[in-house]
Amino acid sequence: MIADLEKRPGRKDYKKNVLTKEEEVAYFKAVERGIVYEGVMTSNGKVSKRIVSQTEEAREARWELIERNRGLVFKAVRDSYGGQIPDFKDPDFKDLVGEGILALIESVDGFDYKRGFRLSTYAFGSIVKRIKRALRKRREQVGGSLEDFSLGEDDQEGFVSTLPDLNVQQPGERLEREGLADSLLNLVSRLKGDRGAMLIQRHCVGDTLEKMSQDYGVSKQAISKALVRAKKKAREEAEDCGGDLLLEGVEGAR
């Protein structure tokens, strides 16, 4: 199964595999039902056709969530090569893909769809961190440099780089400050409704206003106003917890 996930998807596969928010929620609900039915099967030892059907459906749903989000892994690995297309036969490339796939699987298993934001929002940061750790380990073994790990020129407004306190000259240094990004993610996750999800989408994942307007079914102007209100709430949360750097990160994310 892992070997199948590590195969590089083609450009058409990326477009075909993208899940809508509704499809994603439906898959997670199927996984949730399967967990319940597996618990019933374990507790009483009885196996009905319905239990078998629901547990099989849950396994298939979990696989779909992993398989149809694996483009995140290849994006993160490509970015680790400075945005260049790597040699797909390179053992280092395969190792990084494997690490990214494991992070994706863990993200699928640990994701709570009820919090309102997308799996990709939650998973991409975990994938990047897992790949970064693998690169650090390799550096320690062969004496390389973390500056080899770049988010790529095409991702300057993507994950982490939009946060002002992380906007330093070297991408490697920026990722060294990822603790602030993690704290910001923790902060906005406490906001009610879609506020936290919108801030994460805009300022951690780097979604455009146009993309967000399509996701939420409202105009770009409405998204912009909602982001202003969300930032205000985030600033209030940051002030309550005394996080000055965190507050600067939210205030500067425009």
Image: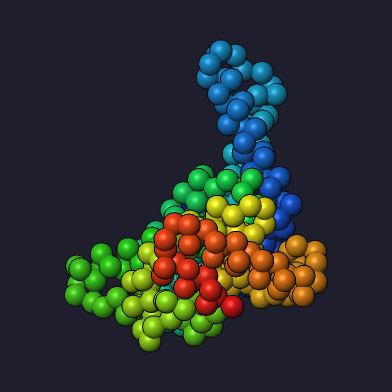
| Location of residue 240 with respect to 144 vertically, above or below | above
Task: Give the quarter of the figure containing the C terminus.
Answer: bottom right
Tell me the colour scheme of the image: rainbow
Question: 53 or 182: which is nearer to us?
Answer: 182
Relative image position of residue 210 (x, y in whole percent): 73, 75
* Residue 19 seen by the camera: yes
Image-quadrant location for residue 99: bottom left
Relative image position of residue 176 (x, y in whole percent): 33, 71
| Location of residue 157 with respect to 182 vertically, above or below | below
Image-quadrant location for residue 198: bottom right
Relative image position of residue 229 (x, y in whole percent): 66, 66
* Residue 71 seen by the camera: no
Image-quadrant location for residue 182: bottom left
Relative image position of residue 207 (x, y in whole percent): 63, 72
Is 231 on the left or on the right of 142, as rendered?
A: right
Question: 156 or 74: which is nearer to us?
Answer: 156
Is 56 on the left or on the right of 154, as rendered?
A: right
| Location of residue 193 with respect to 121 vertically, above or below | above
Instruction: Report the residue at 42% width, 68% height from top.
Output: 244
Question: 88 or 214: which is nearer to us?
Answer: 214
Instruction: Report the residue at 60% width, 67% height from top.
Output: 231
Is 206 on the left or on the right of 245, as rendered?
A: right
Instruction: Report the residue at 48% width, 57% height from top.
Output: 240
- Number of dots carrying numbers: 0
